[in-house]
Amino acid sequence: MLEFLSSGPLLPLTVLLAIVGVYWLFVILGALDLDFLDVDFDATDADVDLDFEVDADVDTGLSGWQQALSFLHLGIVPFMVVFSVFVLSWWTAAAIGFFVLGLGALVGLGGSALLAILATKVLTWPLAVLFRKLKAAKAPVQIIGRVCTALTAIDHERLGQAELATDGAPLLLTVKTTQPGERVARGERALVVARSDDGQVYLVDPVAVQQATV
């Protein structure tokens, strides 16, 4: 087995695989985390589908380098996760090429690298979807300027409760109207226009909701 792992052109990839293994050992022990050597790249609207065709007439707004990173979901999936999948895929493809198909070193390494890139794209796709959802869940919810629904009667003198819809569980807000005399009945909608100085109460406008876009 050791002779197989260290034989010929497979040795450099075996060393890379060992480095990846040591990294994950340190992650398990808590000495390193997933953000180690992470790529600082804004992958906004990066593709997370399985469509490998690119329309040349579409301007993505990304440079060639950014598109290459986006292809492998870097910026969404942590770098070391993508790198680990790539190295494992490369090593596996190279081993099959060398010892099953009998390919030469240059052809075997080059061809297996291309296969590994495609395999990494596919294998990290579910992770990209997962990390995108986790990122969205951690993102702060924009409240000011959104429309809420009154759960109780709301006026300026008495605090009430309102519900703000989100992608996840709805938010419960403590609210009152902006002006004396304004009133929002239970079940009606109002626009959140401001927040009190202490940050505990939101001010809602029952009139402005008519012009608001949800």
Image: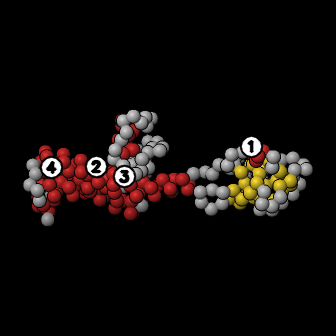
Q: Say what amino acid the circle numbered 3 marks.
A: Leu
Q: Say what amino acid the circle numbered 4 marks.
A: Gly
Say if mark 4 contacts mark 1, CB within 8 Å: no
Q: Which residue is mark 4?
A: 108
Q: Nearer the viewer, residue 59 or 179?
A: 59
Q: Quadrant of residue 6?
A: bottom left
Q: CA distance from mark 3 to mark 4?
A: 26 Å
Find numbered disc 4 in the image and state the secondary structure of the residue it sits on: helix
74 to the left or right of 194: left
Q: Rate crowding at label 1 as few (under 14), some (14 to 19) or many (20 or more) other CA atoms within 10 Å.
A: few
Q: Rate crowding at label 4 as few (under 14), some (14 to 19) or many (20 or more) other CA atoms within 10 Å.
A: many
Q: Which residue is mark 3?
A: 50
Q: Rate crowding at label 2 as few (under 14), some (14 to 19) or many (20 or more) other CA atoms within 10 Å.
A: some
Report x, y in % for residue 163.
72, 59
Q: Rate crowding at label 3 as few (under 14), some (14 to 19) or many (20 or more) other CA atoms within 10 Å.
A: few
- The label number, if any, that marks residue 117 in the structure image: 2
Q: CA distance from mark 1 to mark 3?
A: 40 Å
Residue drawn at (29%, 54%) of the image: 119
